[in-house]
Image: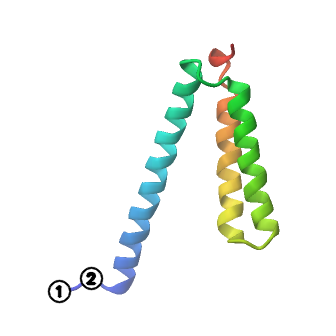
Amino acid sequence: MRSPPDKKRRMRQNRFNAEGQAALLVGESILMALIEHGVLTKNQLVDAIDMAILTKQQMAEDGQDVEVSRIAAGLLTMLRTSIASLTELDA
């Protein structure tokens, strides 16, 4: 028996969400490792994240994938706050 379309859609969405969460977690871990190993300073990383936030905000203003761009800007802002608050990584 085949799954109803709504169940299949929900399963695909759950998979997509899980992939996004995993990617974000790995990305944040790599960023923290770059700071811990002296490849980047915390300030350099925060500046790079700020640039990404500005880019996503501009994309939303330009009408490019508006909802996704706004959500991405929000997630990047949370990442920036998380990285900026790590006092033990201050050099």
Q: Position of residue 64 (x, y in %)?
A: 72, 71
Q: How is the image coloured?
A: rainbow
Residue under label 2, please give it.
3
Residue sitting nearer the eye, 36 or 72? 36
Going by the picture, which residue comes out furthest to the left?
1
Total number of numbered labels?
2
Contact flag, marks 1 and 2 (Cβ < 8 Å): yes
Q: Position of residue 12 (x, y in %)?
A: 38, 71
The residue lying at 36 percent from left, 85 percent from top is 5
Residue 58 falls left or right of residue 22:
right
Q: Residues within 10 Å of mark 1 (few under 14, many from 20)?
A: few
Residue under label 1, please give it.
1
* Rendered view: 17 above or below 46: below
Q: Position of residue 50 (x, y in %)?
A: 76, 42
State which quadrant residue 71 falls in: bottom right
Task: Specify the amino acid type for callout 1.
Answer: Met
State which quadrant residue 83 falls in: top right
The residue lying at 65 percent from left, 24 percent from top is 86
Look at the image and tell me in which quarter the C terminus lies. Answer: top right
* Rendered view: 54 above or below 42: below
Task: Specify the amino acid type for callout 2.
Answer: Ser
State which quadrant residue 8 falls in: bottom left
Residue sitting nearer the eye, 24 or 64? 64
Q: Secondary structure at mark 2?
A: loop
Residue 46 falls left or right of residue 34:
right
